[in-house]
Image (spheres, grey):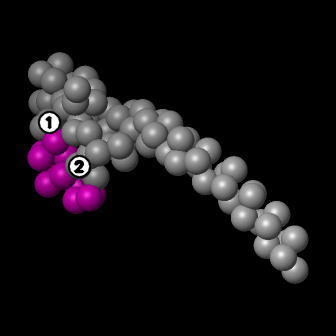
Amino acid sequence: MLIVLLVVSVLLLLTIPNIVKQSKSINDKGCDAFITMVQGQTQAYQLENNKVPSLQDLLSGGYLKGEQKKCPNGKDVLIDSSGKVTEAP
Protein backbone atom coordinates (compact mmCIF):
# COMPACT_ATOMS: atom_id res chain seq x y z
CA MET A 1 0.00 0.00 0.00
CA LEU A 2 2.81 2.41 0.85
CA ILE A 3 4.59 1.54 -2.39
CA VAL A 4 1.47 2.38 -4.41
CA LEU A 5 1.12 5.67 -2.54
CA LEU A 6 4.78 6.46 -3.22
CA VAL A 7 4.40 5.73 -6.95
CA VAL A 8 1.27 7.90 -7.22
CA SER A 9 3.01 10.73 -5.35
CA VAL A 10 6.03 10.59 -7.66
CA LEU A 11 3.78 10.63 -10.74
CA LEU A 12 1.91 13.67 -9.43
CA LEU A 13 5.17 15.48 -8.69
CA LEU A 14 6.30 14.86 -12.26
CA THR A 15 3.06 15.82 -14.03
CA ILE A 16 1.87 18.91 -12.13
CA PRO A 17 4.77 21.20 -13.22
CA ASN A 18 4.26 20.10 -16.84
CA ILE A 19 0.55 20.94 -16.72
CA VAL A 20 1.24 24.38 -15.24
CA LYS A 21 3.89 25.04 -17.90
CA GLN A 22 1.48 24.15 -20.72
CA SER A 23 -1.29 26.38 -19.36
CA LYS A 24 0.19 29.53 -20.97
CA SER A 25 0.48 27.77 -24.32
CA ILE A 26 -3.12 26.58 -24.11
CA ASN A 27 -4.39 30.09 -23.31
CA ASP A 28 -2.37 31.61 -26.17
CA LYS A 29 -3.81 29.11 -28.66
CA GLY A 30 -7.28 29.80 -27.28
CA CYS A 31 -6.69 33.51 -27.83
CA ASP A 32 -5.71 32.88 -31.47
CA ALA A 33 -8.94 30.96 -31.99
CA PHE A 34 -10.96 33.67 -30.24
CA ILE A 35 -9.44 36.40 -32.44
CA THR A 36 -10.32 34.38 -35.55
CA MET A 37 -13.90 34.01 -34.32
CA VAL A 38 -14.21 37.74 -33.54
CA GLN A 39 -12.77 38.53 -36.99
CA GLY A 40 -15.55 36.44 -38.56
CA GLN A 41 -18.20 38.17 -36.47
CA THR A 42 -16.73 41.56 -37.42
CA GLN A 43 -17.03 40.68 -41.10
CA ALA A 44 -20.62 39.51 -40.63
CA TYR A 45 -21.47 42.80 -38.89
CA GLN A 46 -19.82 44.77 -41.70
CA LEU A 47 -21.85 42.92 -44.33
CA GLU A 48 -25.13 43.55 -42.54
CA ASN A 49 -24.56 47.14 -41.36
CA ASN A 50 -22.05 48.57 -43.87
CA LYS A 51 -19.72 49.89 -41.15
CA VAL A 52 -16.81 48.67 -39.05
CA PRO A 53 -18.06 47.68 -35.59
CA SER A 54 -16.54 48.29 -32.21
CA LEU A 55 -16.41 45.50 -29.67
CA GLN A 56 -19.42 47.08 -27.96
CA ASP A 57 -21.36 47.00 -31.27
CA LEU A 58 -20.70 43.27 -31.57
CA LEU A 59 -21.83 42.68 -27.99
CA SER A 60 -25.00 44.75 -28.26
CA GLY A 61 -25.85 43.32 -31.69
CA GLY A 62 -25.73 39.75 -30.42
CA TYR A 63 -22.64 38.81 -32.43
CA LEU A 64 -20.73 38.09 -29.22
CA LYS A 65 -21.92 37.03 -25.79
CA GLY A 66 -21.42 39.30 -22.79
CA GLU A 67 -18.57 37.25 -21.34
CA GLN A 68 -16.65 37.24 -24.63
CA LYS A 69 -14.81 40.52 -24.12
CA LYS A 70 -11.29 39.19 -23.58
CA CYS A 71 -8.99 36.44 -24.77
CA PRO A 72 -8.58 33.34 -22.58
CA ASN A 73 -5.14 34.66 -21.59
CA GLY A 74 -6.80 37.80 -20.14
CA LYS A 75 -5.69 40.31 -22.79
CA ASP A 76 -8.13 42.66 -24.48
CA VAL A 77 -9.21 42.36 -28.11
CA LEU A 78 -8.89 45.40 -30.37
CA ILE A 79 -10.70 46.17 -33.62
CA ASP A 80 -8.98 48.80 -35.80
CA SER A 81 -10.61 51.21 -38.24
CA SER A 82 -10.27 48.73 -41.13
CA GLY A 83 -11.98 45.93 -39.17
CA LYS A 84 -8.86 43.92 -38.37
CA VAL A 85 -9.01 42.17 -35.00
CA THR A 86 -5.83 41.93 -32.89
CA GLU A 87 -4.78 41.12 -29.36
CA ALA A 88 -3.86 44.10 -27.17
CA PRO A 89 -0.14 44.34 -26.34
Residue 20: x and y in percent read: 52, 48
Q: Which residue is mark 1?
A: 53
Camera-side residue: 43 or 31?
Answer: 31
Q: What amino acid is at disc 1? A: Pro
How many C-alpha atoms fall within 10 Å of the one at disc 1: few (<14), some, or many (≥20)?
many
User: Which portion, as a residue range, is magenta?
Assistant: 55-67
Q: Is residue 43 visible?
A: no
Residue 18: x and y in percent read: 61, 44
Residue at the spot x=12%, y=47% of the render?
Answer: 56
How many C-alpha atoms fall within 10 Å of the one at disc 2: few (<14), some, or many (≥20)?
some
Camera-side residue: 49 or 86?
Answer: 86
Residue at the spot x=14%, y=30% of the render?
Answer: 52
Left or right side of 60 for 7: right
Quadrant in which the C terminus is drawn: top left
Q: Is residue 10 visible?
A: yes
Residue 4: x and y in percent read: 85, 72
Q: Which mark is residue 69?
A: 2
Magenta stretch encompasses residue 42? no
Q: Which mark is residue 76?
A: none
